[in-house]
């Protein structure tokens, strides 16, 4: 049976969310096409990660070597080139992350597999692979189809697919022999440097209260901050609010801001332009407050209040403070 490969991404012993998002995509494509999903895990002593992958894959291929402990394009390329040429999977999914952006183009050249990058949707029908990606800074969604090939390669934009989590599978794990390390360019892993964020990381918040232009003026933002504090949320915003410097740019959600996937996303006075939706539509629960019942945000919201946020928010804040 033909196979979909998901290249597992991990960092400092932690599996990265994009891996489970790709497993979600891989499993739904596999189901539609009667294929199987194989997680490919390169690393050193990756037992804990293997267990998680086994629950959402039909098979896990593991290569264990000290050179693979941290991402290094030299060794990853050498390892994956051999595996892909030998196994000829129908599709290889790689995260569109800093590592994936570094890895996928040379891997595509070395294996001859056509590559579509930064994809938000992927469709596999018979021998045809079609994908959706944004161009012109998110103004246009481009549909593309790759030239026919035995193997296709796609990098997947983070935040576009739900987390596969535990699919109740219990994949077998096979160990792949470590190859002769040839064709290396002499890159060495030195250390991970964590960027010093001056502000909170909205992508890590469980609850986000997001402010849009409907807030009217910056003097109204403390009212929203008070509401956020009352419910244990972090404040984020749409682009106009960041552009006007009412909140820092690091709080902006959307294509030119951050992609977020909180448990609850409360959109206050946000119209729901597709550039904004692209950054938040995968939140577990979306609640919108907007005076305009026809605002596009209501098309993705699970709950909505048609009303003036300046009246609604103080009432909700009082309710939660007294709860
Ligand atoms: C290349 C590009 C990239 C972009 N990237 C992003 C991005 O990353 N993130 C982003 O957010 N946008 C982005 N945009 C901008 C995007 O197209 C929209 O212009 C923007 O999202 C609109 O922000 P908004 O919803 O806050 O404002 P508006 O569209 O002006 O909507 C304000 C909403 O508030 C409602 N409202 C008004 N008063 C009240 C009130 N008192 N109570 C309740 N509701 C009220 C109105 O009905 C309206 O729906 C991008 C645009 C481009 C071209």
Image (cartoon, grey):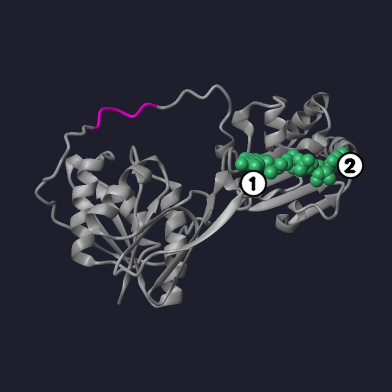
| Above or below: residue 48 compared with residue 61 | above
SS at badge 2: loop
Chief secondary structure of the magenta portion = loop
| Residue shown at 46% from the left, 62% from the top | 25
Q: Which residue is disc 2 drawn over?
A: 308
Task: Identify the magenta region.
Answer: 189-193
Residue 268 in which image quadrant:
top right
Quadrant that contains the N terminus: bottom left
Can the viewer see residue 269? no
Instruction: Name the front one of labels 2 and 1.
Output: 1
| Residue shown at 34% from the left, 52% from the top | 8
Q: Is the residue marked 2 within 8 Å of ligand 1, measured from its CB? A: yes
| Residue shown at 57% from the left, 55% from the top | 141
Q: Is 183 placed left or right of 124 in the picture? A: left
Q: Is 263 placed left or right of 134 in the picture? A: right
Expressed as whole percent of the image width and height from the top left, the position of residue 21 reads 47, 55
Expressed as whole percent of the image width and height from the top left, the position of residue 102 reads 33, 42
Quadrant that contains the C terminus: top right
Q: Is 315 placed left or right of 192 in the picture? A: right
Q: Which mark is residue 298?
A: none
Q: Is the residue marked 1 within 8 Å of ligand 1, measured from its CB? A: yes
Instruction: Confirm whether the magenta stretch covers residue 172.
Output: no
Instruction: Confirm whether the magenta stretch covers residue 192.
Output: yes
| Residue shown at 20% from the left, 62% from the top | 85
| Above or below: residue 33 compared with residue 207 | below
Q: Which residue is disc 1 drawn over?
A: 275
| Above or below: residue 220 compared with residue 157 | above
Q: Compare marks 2 and 1 and give the one earlier in the sequence.
A: 1
SS at badge 1: helix
């Amino acid at each position: 049976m033909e196979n979909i490969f998901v290249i597992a991404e991990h960092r400092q012993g932690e599996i990265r969310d994009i891996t489970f998002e790709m497993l979600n995509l891989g499993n739904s494509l596999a189901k539609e096409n009667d294929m199987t999903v194989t997680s490919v895990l390169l690393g050193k002593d990756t037992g804990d990660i293997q267990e998680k992958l086994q629950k959402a894959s039909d098979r896990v291929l593991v290569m264990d070597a000290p050179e693979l402990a941290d991402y290094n394009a030299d060794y990853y390329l050498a390892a994956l080139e051999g595996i892909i040429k030998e196994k000829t999977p129908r599709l290889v999914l790689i995260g569109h992350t800093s590592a994936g952006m570094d890895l996928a183009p040379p891997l595509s050249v070395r294996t001859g597999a056509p590559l579509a990058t930064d994809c938000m949707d992927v469709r596999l029908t018979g021998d045809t692979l079609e994908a959706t990606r944004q161009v012109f800074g998110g103004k246009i969604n481009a549909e593309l189809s790759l030239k026919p090939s035995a193997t296709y390669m796609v990098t997947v934009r983070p935040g576009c697919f739900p987390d596969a989590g535990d699919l109740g599978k219990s994949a077998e794990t096979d160990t792949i022999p470590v190859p002769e390390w040839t064709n290396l360019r002499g890159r060495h892993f030195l250390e991970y440097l964590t960027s010093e964020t001056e502000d909170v990381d909205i992508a890590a918040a469980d609850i986000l209260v997001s402010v849009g232009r409907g807030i009217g003026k910056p003097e109204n933002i403390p009212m929203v901050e008070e509401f956020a504090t009352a419910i244990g949320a972090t404040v984020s915003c749409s682009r106009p609010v960041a552009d006007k410097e009412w909140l820092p740019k690091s709080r902006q959600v959307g294509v030119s801001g951050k992609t977020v996937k909180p448990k609850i996303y409360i959109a206050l006075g946000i119209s729901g332009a597709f550039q904004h939706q692209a950054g938040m539509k995968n939140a577990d629960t979306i609640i919108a407050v907007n005076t305009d019942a026809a605002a596009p945000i209501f098309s993705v919201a699970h709950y909505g209040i048609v009303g003036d946020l300046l009246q609604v928010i103080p009432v909700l804040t009082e309710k939660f403070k007294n709860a």
